[in-house]
Amino acid sequence: MKNSQREPKTKKTSSNNALPILLGAHMSIAGGVPTAVERAKRIGCTTMQMFVKNNNQWRGKPLTVEDASTYKKLLSESRIGPVVVHDTYLINLCAVNKDILQKSRIALKDEMDRCEMLGVEYLNFYPGAHMGAGEEDGIKRIAESLNLIHDQTKGYRVKSVLETTAGQGTAIGYRFEQLREIIDLVEQRDRMAVCVDTCHVFVAGYDIVTEKGYQQTFEEFDAIIGLDRLVAFHVNDSKREIGSRVDRHEHIGKGYIGKKGFSFLMNDPRFVNIPKILETPKGEDMKEDMMNMRVLRELVKDGERQRLKKYR
């Protein structure tokens, strides 16, 4: 999976040194999946994330051919892409309770079906919470779940995207090594990818605030997982301090990561073609999304990008 294969739909600015920014936010699907595209377009997103059914229910209203057709038409007429889908919050691929585990596997398979119907490239999900069974047991069960689901969805284009977690409670995925172990146990490894959540990795103990720490974090990611598997960022500041393992998102520049930490990410030439998606608090008018995107865009400096090229 090479980043060069994902051609951005954004237009370059007049500056020869300027590079496109794939920046967006999680959009509501209230009123139907196609409305997420309309909302994203309204506030100037060049990428976006959405659910494909109610995020707090095991079963969702069926996605119709008309819904899919309208969504694809609206997307083709926009400058938005790629699109990331986030799974429903009930899913736990390593649940100890057999009924919850079965429901989780059925639900994720259903979401893959929906993504494939919509032509979505990435289905993002939390690896799971072992609920006291232990991390080793949880990792094996997550891979087992993915192998079962992949067997039922052979030939699908959508990637299975593991999201880095904060490590709150018994959540798995707060260390890069855990994600690597899951990937290694998955039979169809070419279908596996990773999303880095800035708040999550920060509270999990990775220093992305200092330049040295930021570079070391992604050198470690590359050595353990491989940057070629990195397909998305969730850009969220943190209400809690590094290593706290408490997942609380904050507006950009208002938390412990701060503008300096995000300036490294926004100016890193390795990640220009990687979607950067906000999951920060907001209201229906999405003014907060516009504010946060403006802050992130203002951090982009051509000179800084040139300087950071030495880390490529």
Image (cartoon, rainbow, N blue to C red):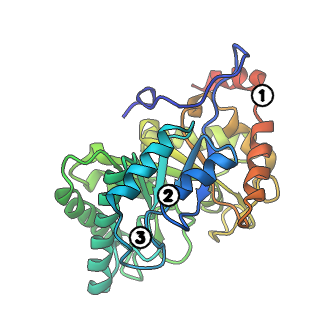
Can see residue 64?
A: yes
For marks 1 and 3, give the CA distance: 38 Å
Image coordinates for residue 148, horizontal then vertical, percent: 20, 64
Tell me if residue 271 comes above or below residue 157 in the rendering. above
Left or right placement of residue 89 versus residue 150 in this view:
right
**Quarter placement of the C terminus:** top right
Q: Amino acid at mark 1?
A: Lys
Tell me if residue 287 comes above or below residue 284 in the rendering. above
Q: Earlier in the sequence, mark 1 or mark 3?
A: 3
Image coordinates for residue 233, horizontal then vertical, percent: 57, 48
Label 2: which secondary element: loop
Label 1: which secondary element: loop
Q: Quadrant of residue 243?
A: bottom right
Question: Is disc 1 surrounded by few (<14), some (14 to 19) or many (20+) residues within 10 Å?
Answer: some
Question: Is disc 3 surrounded by few (<14), some (14 to 19) or many (20+) residues within 10 Å?
Answer: many
Can see residue 82?
A: no
Which residue is painted at 70% across and 16% down in the image?
A: 17
Q: Which residue is mark 1?
A: 301
For marks 2 and 1, give the CA distance: 31 Å
Q: Amino acid at mark 2?
A: Arg
Question: Is disc 2 surrounded by few (<14), some (14 to 19) or many (20+) residues within 10 Å?
Answer: some
Q: Earlier in the sequence, mark 2 or mark 1?
A: 2
Q: Quadrant of residue 143?
A: bottom left
Callout in the foreground (1, 3): 1
Q: Which residue is mark 2?
A: 175
Which residue is painted at 33% across and 83% down in the image?
A: 100
Image coordinates for residue 135, horizontal then vertical, percent: 39, 71
Q: Which residue is mark 3?
A: 128
Image coordinates for residue 18, horizontal then vertical, percent: 69, 21
